Amino acid sequence: MDSDCVFNNADRNLGMYGQSPFLIKLERQSYNITLNTDSAGNYDIPVDTGNYRISIINPSNIFEYSCPDSGVIHVYVSTYGDTVTGNDLGFKIKYNCNRLRVNVSSSRLRPCDPASINVSYYNEGSVDENNPIVNLRLPPELINITSAQSFTTLPDNTYQFSLPPISICGIESFSVSAEVICDPNALQNATLCMDADISPVNFCSLEPSSSWDGSYVRVVSACENDSACFNIYNIADAGSDMDLPSEWRLYANNLLIQQGAFQLLSGGDTTLCFSSDGRTYRLEVDQTDSFPTAGTPDANVERCGVLQSGTNYSLNYILQSPRDNSVPFHKTYCARIFNSYDPNAKSVTPMGFGTNHIVDPNERITYRIDFQNTGNDTAYFVKIIDNLDYYFDPTTIQLISSSHPYNFSIQDNELTWLFDPIFLPDSNVDETNSHGYVEFSLKVKSITPQGTSINNTAQIYFDNNNPINANAAWIRICTPETPAINIFPVSDFCSGRISFTSTMQNQGTNPIVTWYLNGSWIATSSDTVDFNGVFFNDVISATLNSNSACSISDSVASNQFQITGTPPSITYAWPQLTSSPAVSYLWFLNTKLFRCNKSIVHSRCNG
């Protein structure tokens, strides 16, 4: 942080800005390299002789380049073995703003076992913050909450931490200990979510538009009396009422099933409850127009409701969709519970929708690398190397969390974490403390083609042993498409006959439509389906299997169409029979058709 374009004691060394390392880019013709500064803000790049362009990537709109104003310097290396020093790059404050960021993560969650919850907080503003406060809301499945950091217990499983002052670019953390309730059968593959909020909240650095009404909407969920309930809050300061209604959308197993609108005064809230049948429900809401970020707050309810005979709770849907972490002062973290697992593994969130693992190109993608010392002695250091896919943009990286202190370096697409020393005990001696992890996030490049599959793995080194290769975590970068099918009749219902067709959306190039009558499959390959032997109250439906590369679901169900109507009534006044009004008429004598399209017939024979 520069004060006068001369590096001196009045300046601050910048190694990190919140979760983002300061990145240096060196270029010479077709050659370029990107790397981070060390913790003191220094960089050292071995190069050949020649002219080089050196620039620094600004991770924040709170700062702007100062020395030079362009953020670029040119360096000439004249001879081999030469050292060119003093190539400093400076920033100055652009906005006098408070800006706090919070992050929460946890060790792996396992029934009956202890869990460590790590909370990190950052001062990304341009002024020191004297009274930061973190509210941590935990799921009810975590019990016996303790922490070396003092806290106050609030309603709804919320714990409030009043924290010491934090200076500009400061990074602090604390941990919370808990236990996962001991119910392995009920919790296997369940997903638990926790929320962290830090205050004071200030939108200044997000450059809000003057047309924004100041409202700030959040969603909290709970299972209440077999219903999935969602509380929508406008937590903005007084006077920040919603000027216009915003939309809410309800998803079941990630498929949209209902939507509506809401409008709240500042400090106001509304509650929506939906009868739950064991599916995973997600309520997603829109902020008002001109809100400073593009996120959509959401909350999930899993393992709720009365199950029908032979059914189970729908699991593994929460991590398919992204969480709304678009504002720095709020973080939602979700993790799946396992009874057993690979101790050295890589995972990705969002996991992506459906079997195609569809992730929107604009989403920030989070990776987690877990490791465990399963050897027979203490591990003194651990090194993790992650080679990013070409389509990842390394300049967007954020270092989110870790179990232990580390040194980090990035060189182009190679990321390295070094835990030295770590003194990681082996699992036979201390299973609980034999684990570790790192989490980071980044975005894909804007040039990434639709449908690109990205595989990402990592190598984990314990001391001087051969590396352990973590599993590949893969996703497909694609704008998500939701297949849909709507069926409707194209003929009148007459004499047990009716014809149907369908319209489809996002069906792909070779869709498969399957038709059903009262739940039984009807063999057909025609676009228009003729049903015979149909009666009043019969139900016709269909399913669509889409082969779209960006489909979030392999199969979706249509609307259900029930055959309705009033059975005809016939009156007799000799010598004629008269039918009640209808669209068309078929008269039968002893089951044989003998008149058509007449509402009145004359009876001149027995039968």
Image: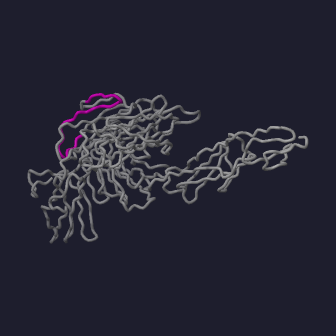
The quadrant in which the C terminus is found is: top right
The x and y percentages for residue 86 are 12, 61
User: In the drawing, does residue 149 fall left or right of residue 389?
Assistant: left
Residue at the spot 87% in from the left edge and 42% down from the top edge = 603
Q: Is residue 508 above or below residue 217?
A: below
Can I make out residue 312 in this image?
Answer: yes
**How many numbered discs?**
0
Q: Quadrant of residue 537?
A: top right
Q: Is residue 434 above or below residue 471?
A: above
Residue at the spot 43% in from the left edge and 46% down from the top edge = 321
Can I make out residue 316 in this image?
Answer: no
Color style of the picture: one colour
The x and y percentages for residue 301 are 44, 37
Q: Is residue 128 magenta?
A: no
Q: Is residue 180 above or below residue 46?
A: above
The x and y percentages for residue 97 are 20, 46
The front one of 124 and 534 is: 534
User: In the drawing, does residue 255 fall left or right of residue 194?
Assistant: right
Q: Quadrant of residue 395?
A: bottom left
Which region shows up in magenta?
Answer: 151-172
- Residue extending farthest to the right is 605
The x and y percentages for residue 124 are 22, 47
The front one of 289 and 15 is: 289
User: In the drawing, does residue 408 fall left or right of residue 284?
Assistant: left
Q: Is residue 169 magenta?
A: yes
The front one of 157 and 487 is: 487
